[in-house]
Image: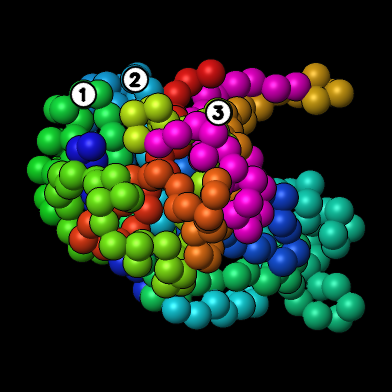
Amino acid sequence: MEYLRLCFKAPTAHYRIPFTYKVRHSYPIPPYSTVIGLLCNILGEEGTIACFLGQPFGLYIVGRYQTLTREYTWLRNLEPKSHYKRFLSKDSRHSGQVAEHPGGQSPVVLDVLNEVETTVYLAHPDCDVLARLQENLFRPGRWINHLHLGRAEDWVVPEGVGCITLFPSSEVDPAWTVDRGYYFWLPHPEETWELGEWGDRQEYTELFGKIMGSPQLVCTLYRKVKVRNEKGKSWGIRNFNHVRAKLCRGQIPLVQFGSLPRVMVDPEFMLPVFPAHIAWR
């Protein structure tokens, strides 16, 4: 099967796990929504982005990092109400005889990944979208903004792009099953892209149940919606769709009768590919 493969490297990255606050933990690889945003950035044009997001497509993300460090930083709040609540006066910014930032400040710990590698596999029914990604990846003038994954300060460097043919696992060396330190999203059997064309549903379901991993609801596409609180005040939020998946790292286990599961494999990188079905819901 034909897929577009894009490779990126970055010196640092932080993919925040939702609802982590004082200590902001990071996923080891970006969620689907983060990579979709990067691809839209590369496409650049609104019309092409609409074609990209307007049709269901398959997406697989795999990556690794060298080390994890923790940064200690301050978060600031510049709202007047926050300042008065913290200091009880609009003319003061001292608490405990120590001068603080106007509005107040909170100490926060962030997990930061170092020396990050990310590889993306994309299948899309519109060949023009894939061609535009190939054309634009190394042409910064066509991007919407600088390329980054996660935080705006975490710039990524494109390393390569190209269409590749994925082989059935039965036709390649079993070395693809070995743990080489890569993390990947393994979508639920009901969330896979065209599973019937590259694998057996029963085998894949058994693989999903056996493999070690952390079950997650991974963000994909979103729409902006208005919500109201109990006081009637409204504001806009991003209402995300999600894919059920496992965050995995490790050797691929055996399935029925001690055999390896039938999956797609990148013959050059020797990586199994498990694409998720991304579509509006």
Q: Secondary structure at mark 3?
A: helix
Residue linked to disc 3: 190
* Left or right: 172 as drawn, with respect to 90: left
Tally of numbered discs: 3
Q: Which region of the structure is painted magenta?
A: 199-228
- State which mark lies toward you, 3 or 2: 3
Percent position (x, y) of residue 133? 19, 40
Going by the numbered disc 1, the residue's amino acid type is Asp
Which of these two is toward me, 271 or 58? Answer: 271
Image vertical order of residue 123 relative to residue 5, above or below: above
Residue located 85% across and 23% down the image = 231
Going by the numbered disc 3, the residue's amino acid type is Glu
Percent position (x, y) of residue 179? 46, 69
Image vertical order of residue 80 relative to residue 99, above or below: above
Q: Secondary structure at mark 1?
A: loop
If the image is split into quadrants, where does the N terminus sit? top left
Residue located 81% across and 73% down the image = 94
Which of these two is toward me, 84 or 269? Answer: 269
Residue linked to disc 2: 55
- CB under 8 Å between discs 3 and 1: no
Label 3, label 2: how far apart the Cα atoms are: 18 Å
Going by the numbered disc 2, the residue's amino acid type is Gln
Residue linked to disc 1: 126
